[in-house]
């Protein structure tokens, strides 16, 4: 079967048509980067009107890229939370309209579950429409597994037991990792459209990660939680010190080389913190449940190549090597395929929602999710 997925939780309007084996038949994404760039962050009211302007076109483009008409899709999935309420509502109302008008099954998608489930699509399925349909329903990995979600709004380690069944074993005490990247990018005056992550990653490649000593957060706490607020302050103080040494007024005026050193040192310390917490989680989880030996890394920051190779090493360099599953970079950040794929996974376990009366949720607690409807 095929599913139309719609995503509008933040500043990207996305739609995609997926076949139930994970093959992306058509997709479309309207990014609002240039709209929010002058403001240094996402402005909800501007995001909402951009979603309204783009949503029909994005859906139509995804359909025509798939060579399909709306009548031909078998179900509709849409992000219903968490996210910006006025933005979620644009996608959700459109999806409800379509589901009711064309009498299609409807699935209200949890955005974080959608990020996680992307790691289950078999790699050979991405974009490969030449594979005969639905022949192989194999997954990149089976439940249970450990998941690291590193996105713009979240930083969590979870045990994934099944669709709709997740238990959190570590979370952030303050900022998310994506936020830390965005704030560091802003400090250095880098473009933050689409998040500052890609700009920091690029700059960090030419810098020396050991040039600026930054403290690794939460060294004394032997749990799996994260903290990125202190690192953000340490980066700011270090760059202020450098500004005095170089006799410039702000970090933006530092040389490319100095900026690259700050970016590389920040990224290295941020990832070191992640590795330490993750390694602890892997040890704990292996002891509790020896079936678990797969790590899924998902969310926007998972698009970072340095992170991908470091975590690959973390998984392999153990007595009991783990398998690592990370979606391709473009599927780590928000887009329509994630809503479509999460809907496929829900439908395959017999779970769907009623379009009528579906609400959106700015906050949407991850535990106690009930997908047994
Ligand atoms: P959430 O999913 O928690 O609701 P979101 O949807 O806004 O938040 P995502 O789209 O998953 O977040 O990810 C966006 C974040 O990923 C931004 O903070 C961005 O800086 C970060 N990011 C994207 N690409 C990279 C990269 N290459 N390196 C580091 N960070 C990155
Ligand atoms: Fe997201």
Image (spheres, helix red, strand yellow):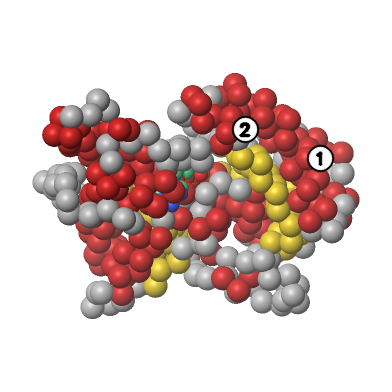
Query: 218 or 280, which is in the foreground?
Result: 218
> Badge 2: how crowded within 10 Å, few (<14), some, or many (20+)?
many
Residue beneath disc 2: 88
**Which of the 4 image quarters holds residue 100?**
top right
Which residue is painted at 27% across and 47% down in the image?
A: 257
Tell me where residue 133 appears, x and y as whole percent: 75, 73
Q: Residue 98 carries which label?
A: 1
**Mark 1 touches mark 2? (CB < 8 Å):** no
Image quadrant where residue 243 sits: top left
Q: In which quarter of the image is the N terminus?
A: bottom right
Question: From what the image shows, is residue 220 above or below residue 139?
Answer: above
Q: Which residue is drawn at 27% across and 37% down?
A: 254
- Please name the residue shown 74% across and 43% down the image: 58
Residue 366 sits above or below residue 201 on the image: above
Residue extending farthest to the left is 220
Would you say residue 150 is visible in this rendering? no
- Residue 318, by quadrant, is bottom left
* Residue 372, above or below 21: above
**Residue 155, placed above or below residue 253:** below
What residue sits 32% from the left and 52% below the top? 204
Q: Where is residue 154 in the image (x, y as percent from the top left)?
A: 41, 42
Residue 212 showing in the rendered view: yes
Q: Which of marks 1 and 2 is nearer the N terminus?
A: 2
SS of the residue at dot 1? Answer: helix
Report the front residue among 354 and 72: 72
């Amino acid at each position: 079967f095929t599913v139309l997925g719609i995503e509008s939780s933040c500043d990207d309007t996305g739609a995609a048509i997926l076949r139930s084996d994970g093959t992306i038949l058509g997709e479309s994404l309207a990014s609002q980067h240039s709209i929010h760039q002058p403001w240094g962050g996402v402005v909800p009211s501007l995001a909402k009107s951009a979603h309204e302007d783009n949503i029909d076109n994005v859906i139509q483009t995804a359909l025509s890229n798939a060579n399909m008409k709306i009548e031909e899709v078998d179900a509709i999935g849409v992000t219903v939370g968490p996210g910006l309420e006025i933005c979620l509502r644009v996608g959700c109302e459109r999806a409800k309209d379509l589901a009711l008008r064309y009498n299609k099954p409807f699935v209200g998608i949890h955005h974080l579950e959608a990020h996680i489930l992307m790691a289950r699509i078999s790699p050979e399925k991405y974009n490969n429409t030449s594979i005969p349909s639905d022949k192989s329903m194999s997954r990149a990995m089976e439940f249970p597994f450990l998941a690291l979600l590193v996105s713009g709004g979240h930083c969590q380690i979870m045990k994934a037991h099944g669709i709709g069944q997740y238990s959190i074993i570590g979370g952030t005490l303050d900022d998310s990792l994506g936020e830390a990247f965005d704030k560091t990018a802003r400090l250095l005056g880098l473009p933050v459209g689409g998040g500052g992550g890609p700009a920091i990653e690029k700059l960090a490649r030419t810098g020396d990660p050991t040039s600026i000593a930054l403290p690794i957060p939460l060294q004394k706490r032997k749990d799996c939680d994260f903290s990125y607020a202190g690192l953000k302050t340490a980066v700011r103080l270090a760059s202020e010190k450098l500004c005095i040494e170089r006799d410039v007024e702000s970090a933006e005026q530092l040389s490319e080389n100095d900026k690259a050193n700050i970016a590389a040192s920040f990224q290295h310390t941020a990832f070191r913190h992640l590795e330490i917490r993750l390694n602890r989680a892997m040890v704990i989880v292996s002891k509790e449940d020896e079936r678990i030996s797969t790590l899924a890394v998902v969310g926007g920051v998972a698009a970072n190549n340095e992170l991908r190779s470091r975590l690959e090493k973390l998984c392999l360099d153990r007595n009991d090597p783990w398998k690592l599953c990370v979606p391709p970079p473009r599927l780590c950040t928000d887009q329509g395929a994630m809503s479509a794929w999460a809907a496929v996974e829900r439908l395959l376990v017999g779970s769907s929602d009623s379009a009528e009366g579906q609400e959106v949720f700015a906050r949407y607690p991850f535990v106690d999710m009930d997908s047994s409807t």
